[in-house]
Amino acid sequence: MNSIKSKIIIAFSVIVFIVASLLAFVFVVNYNLTNGYKAINNNIIFEQSLKDDVLSLIGISYNSFNTNDYSQYYTQLYKVKTTEDKLDLIFNSSSVDIETKLAYRSLKNSLTTVLGNVEKTKADLVKNGGIVGISKFYQDTLIQFEYVKKNIDNLLISETKNIAKTTISINSAQDFLTKLTSIIAILTVLLILFLILIFSNSITKPILYLYEVSKKITGGDLNVIIDENIKNKNNEMGHLASAFSLMILKLKEKIAAVDESSKKVLKSNSDLENSNKAILNILEDVEKEKNNAENIASDLEKFKLAVENASDQIIITDVEGIVIYGNKAVYKITGYTAEEAMGKKAGVLWKSPMSTDYYKNLWDIIKNQKKMFISEIQNKRKSGDIYTAAISIFSVLNKDGEIIYFVAIERDITKEKEVDKAKTEFVSLASHQLRTPLSAINWYTEMLLAGDAGAVNDEQKKYLEEIAIGNKRMVDLVDDLLNVSRLDMGTFVIETKPVNLLELIKSVLKESSAMILEKKMIIKESYDEGLSLFLADEKLIRMIFQNLLSNAVKYTPPSGLIKISLLKINKGESFGDKIIDEESLAYSVADSGMGIPTSQQGRIFSKLFRADNAKESETEGTGLGLYVVKSIVDQAGGSLWFKSEENKGSTFYVVFPLSGMKVKEKVKEVV
Amino acid sequence: MNNGKKIILVLEDERPLLEAIRIKLEKNNFEVVTTRTVEQAKEYVKDLAVVDAIWLDHYLIGRETGLDFVAWCKEEDNIKCKCIPIFVVSNTASSDKVTTYMSLGTKKYFVKSNHKLDEIIQEIYKSLSEK
């Protein structure tokens, strides 16, 4: 791979190398020149010192000669000798020019000569000593040393020339080198700039290109395609470009995938929304249910409290009659606690003295017929007392209609019974007490009228008859009051047997015949054909017919019209402006009498109520008749209503289901 | 003794009524024995050789009522009394009492104040002749 990096590295390496080399060259040259200069300078310094030494030797030797102390002389001489060696070293290097070399040779020769001479002189001195010798020495050597000095000077001159030359060389070289260095610097910069330019192309352009591409991508256009040329370049940029291209591809894929996912997510979201809503609804419902349940629970609590504390005894048993719950009243009434009663068969504990048939009937009604058993029962308390209770037992069914519990509610009615008994006795006695004097009046009047105590004249007869009438009224009133009290106490009974109603009506008409004849009433009868026997309580239905008829007769002026009808009505037919919704027997009495004022019609069936027009008229009435009749009709399952217009007349309608009067039994069993 | 007249035993506690009944019955050719208590009535039944009918009120003097008398009378071993027709003439009109009396075997039940004496006597007479 022609990596840009390697290219850059190479380029810079080359540059560095070139620069380094040039600089090295410059440096080396400089060094050499400097060294050369130094060398020459050193030589000069050496020669200078040699010269000094020689000069001083000359001086010393003069002194020595004068003083005859040659120690200093020899020391210095030795020093010069050593210098000779050094001189060899210096000038045996090849870097000396010819002139200098010649000068050196001369010096060397002279030095050798002088030193040789010195030796000789020295020897001479030793041998010859004295002034002669010294003068010789002085002359010889000194001259030679002067010669040496001259040589040295020549050498120095040469050297100085050299140095000057060298210095010039050095300067010019340094000039050159400086120039060269500048050129190198400039070239390097140019080179670098050039390289930058080149490489920037390789680097910056692709980068800018990719920048443009990425701008497009961020702009949302994922369909940019990177130039093949750029991609395929086999260098870092090329790799970057192709990586970029791949990245774009992958990005596209990822975005597509994300879009998919986000679509799914949105869908899930909306599903979740819906679920949420559903859940919220459910939660609302649950909340409502919870509230309901709480309400129910609190209601149940109330009911539980009510049941627990009810004054009536409430027992719950299973299907077999085993007690599973008893309220507080169990103890109050029976003397046994609810706990004592638990788990035992109901009735076992309070050993009811009822007959087997009673129980058979009880179980039949509650278990087989699954109906409510309402009756009176006698039970024995823990103390042994027998008490009477009004009992109602009903079954609780599960959703399959099977019995799961029985609930028995008992009320201790012993006192009530006693009170009732007392009331009945009282009414009985009272009516008896009232009737007794009435009977006396009745019978004695009868006897008088019959002449059993002697003949009576007309006037007497009239008075006696008045007494009889008054008496009859009282008797009727007592009868009515007795009926009313029985109705109020609910002690009257409806016992039915098949009755020939036509015969009954006829009999009733006969009863009122006296008054009918007297008032010259016109009776119109209208009876359906083929009316069969009707299941009724003869006494009571007689009362109904009799009362309505006597009212019609009483409240109609003489020569009035009374219409009696007895009909069979089919389901859906109309009778007395009412639609009768079942097969029925219908009786109506219509008169042309004084009618009932509209404002008082609502009270006509009330106890002891007589309308104003009735009261004003001379007719007698207790105001109890219609009350009694209405009560009987209602209790016997029939309907009684009327239509009336003042001074026009009234029509009273009685309807019973064709099946007969409803039987009303006395609840108490005949003991 | 018995001269073709029927002997009727009347149990009634109210004196004026008892008197009126007696008069009327005698007028109608009855031999009348009156009493105001069950106790005495029992004695009469025991003592008298024949009693053709009994006129019985419900409320009487003493603790025992007409019902007690009927119950005694209709006892199995009271052969003498058992067959005597009893006519209950009382002012008590409660159907209870009526049913009770009739179920014990009395012949008829009259509500005093609703009938003339003549009526009742006629009925008794008719009933006895039917026998």
Image (cartoon, helix red, strand yellow):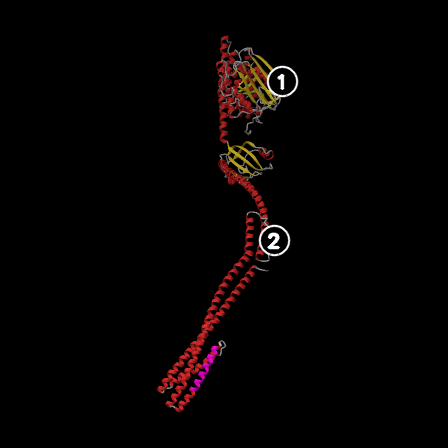
The relative height of residue A603 versus residue A70 in the rendered view (above or below) is above
Residue A400 seen in this snapshot: yes
Image quarter of the C terminus of chain A: top right
Residue B52 image offset from top left, x and y in percent: 57, 19
Screen quadrant of the N terminus of chain A: bottom right
Residue picked out by circle 2:
A228
Say which mark, if any, is on residue B110: none
Residue corresponding to mark 1? A528
- Where does the image place residue A243, in percent across and percent down from the top left? 58, 54
Amino acid identity at mark 2: Glu
Residue A79 in sight: no
Q: Chain of mark 2?
A: A
Is disc 2 placed on a helix, strand or loop? Answer: helix
**Is label 1 or label 2 in front?**
2
- Mark closer to the chain start, 1 or 2: 2
Instruction: Give the magenta-colored segment's residue range.
Output: A99-117
Magenta portion: prevailing SS class: helix
| Front-lying residue, A660 or A71 | A71
1 and 2 marks in contact (CB < 8 Å): no
Q: Does the magenta-highlighted stretch encompass residue A105? A: yes
Residue A150 at what x, y percent from top left?
42, 80
Q: Is residue A246 left or right of residue A180?
A: right
